């Protein structure tokens, strides 16, 4: 699968994040909205990175679970 297709698929699946690939080849995601103190305490991160698109997707799933755990 092409770089652009991976990027588009991840961006569609996680619309609350900006997804990109650095010139060094790392995959990155940054949230669109700031985190609350409770979310940070739960391990939510504003920006994450991975070696490849699958690794980034795994981290994004983890971040989604952490965020869901902070919603009453």
Image: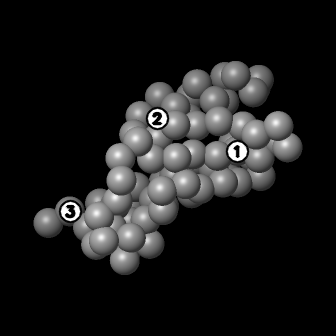
Instruction: Decide which of tag 1 and tag 2 comes sooner along the chain.
Output: 2
- Select label 1 or label 2 by which is in front: 1
**Does the image show residue 71?**
yes
Left or right for 22, reference 47: right
Q: Classify residue 35 by image quadrant.
A: bottom left
Residue carrying label 2: 13
Q: Counting other residues with Cα less than 10 Å from the Cα at mark 2, is it few (<14), some (14-19), or many (20 or more)? A: few
Image location of residue 47, percent across then percent down: 55, 54
CB atoms at circles 2 and 3 under 8 Å apart? no
Instruction: Decide which of tag 2 and tag 3 comes sooner along the chain.
Output: 2
- Select label 2 or label 3 by which is in front: 3
Residue carrying label 1: 27
Mark 1 to mark 3 CA distance (whole Å):
27 Å
Up the image or down, 38 lies above or below 9; here it is below
**Does the image show residue 58?**
no
Up the image or down, 41 lies above or below 44; here it is below
Residue drawn where x is 65% and y is 36% of the image = 20
Mark 1 to mark 2 CA distance (whole Å):
15 Å
Residue drawn where x is 36% and y is 53% of the image = 34
Work out which quarter of the rendered image holds the N terminus and state it: top right
Residue drawn where x is 14% and y is 66% of the image = 72
CB atoms at circles 1 and 3 under 8 Å apart? no
Mark 2 to mark 3 CA distance (whole Å):
20 Å
Mark carried by residue 71? 3
């Amino acid at each position: 699968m092409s770089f652009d297709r991976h990027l588009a698929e991840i961006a569609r699946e996680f619309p609350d994040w900006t997804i990109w690939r650095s010139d060094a080849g790392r995959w990155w995601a940054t949230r669109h909205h700031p985190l609350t103190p409770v979310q940070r305490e739960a391990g939510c991160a504003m920006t994450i990175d991975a070696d490849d698109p699958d690794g980034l997707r795994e981290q994004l799933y983890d971040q989604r679970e952490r965020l869901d755990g902070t919603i009453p």
